[in-house]
Image (tube, grey):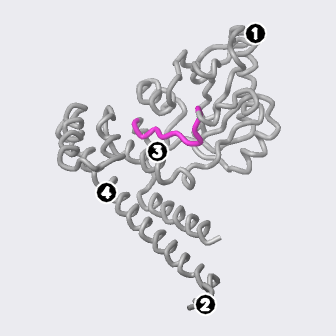
Amino acid sequence: MNLPATPTEYFPPVLQLIQQAKSRALSTVNHQLLELYWQIGEYLSFKVAEQGWGQGTVKELAKWLTEREPNLRGFYLKLAVEQRWSTRELEQQINNVLFERTIASPLKVSAVLRELHPAADQVFKDSYLFDFLHLPEPHHERDLQQGLIKHLKQFLLELGRDFCFIGQEFSVQVGQKDFSIDLLFFHRELQALVAFELKIDDFKPAYLGQLEFYLEALDRDHRKAHEAASIGVLLCKNRDHDVVEYALSRSLSPTVVAQYQTRLPDKALLQAKLDEFYELAKQESEQ
């Protein structure tokens, strides 16, 4: 008995239904994970602040959870190795795992920096979170600088590994005049001095000129022979991406333009970004 040919042209809708169902299921699961992460983070933050929970207690909690839910992975594994757990670590976990493609903007660096330091994209961030400073609004540049020095350990954790602090208001002399760099670091992997200039307002192209002047002074008078070209990081409260792109396109120095936040993004914003992420995933799967 000869069977009729398989009508394969009718198969794609079945596949599409499966893909749509998988997308909806994944979205639902991760909405639940987002809520779970947020609730646990809030609970632990309360226990740390109000009842003095420390690293030992958090590790005991991780051990206790592992014994009762041995198949759990990811979140609880991170919980077990963190020095502390708060809503800040929670936000970073969500950002790194779920929202990396939608929350963080492309890193704003000059072409010179990409050429001299190809690893810059892995070293610097587009946005830094300084919620540990508890800065007033409005605040002054001096408040920001002093706060970062007072909480230098947290600042270094936010910057990432291999940053070594050199000085605050680091003095450089050009001609008969003295100038001060807000914060100066050295990065071990890049083998370069890293100058941070702090601005509490919107990015202005003129700020890059000042930073490039400091980098020239560092390279001429302070950089050692075995070190790479000095890097400048301009930290602003806000920035217009088009203005930054235009300014960096003509920059002849290895510079980064980043922004800082003094508090966690609103939970509703994170949820909206999650919705956006899965909408993009759905569109890609349908193409």
Going from N to C along the chain, the mark reached first, 2 or 1, is 2
Check the picture and name the quadrant holding the C terminus.
bottom right
Characterize the local packing of mark 1: few (<14), some (14-19) or many (20 or more) Cα atoms within 10 angstroms. Answer: few
Q: Nearer the viewer, residue 124 or 23?
A: 23
Which residue is located at x 30 percent, y 44 percent? 76
Q: Position of residue 259 (x, y in %)?
A: 58, 42
Magenta span:
123-132
Q: Position of residue 73 (x, y in %)?
A: 33, 47
Q: Is residue 46 above or below residue 6?
A: above
* Magenta span contains residue 287: no
* Magenta span contains residue 125: yes
Going from N to C along the chain, the mark reached first, 2 or 3, is 2
Which residue is located at x 64 percent, y 45 percent? 202
Residue under numbered circle 4: 36
Separation of residues labelled 4 and 3 (CA atoms): 31 Å
SS class of the residue under badge 4?
A: helix
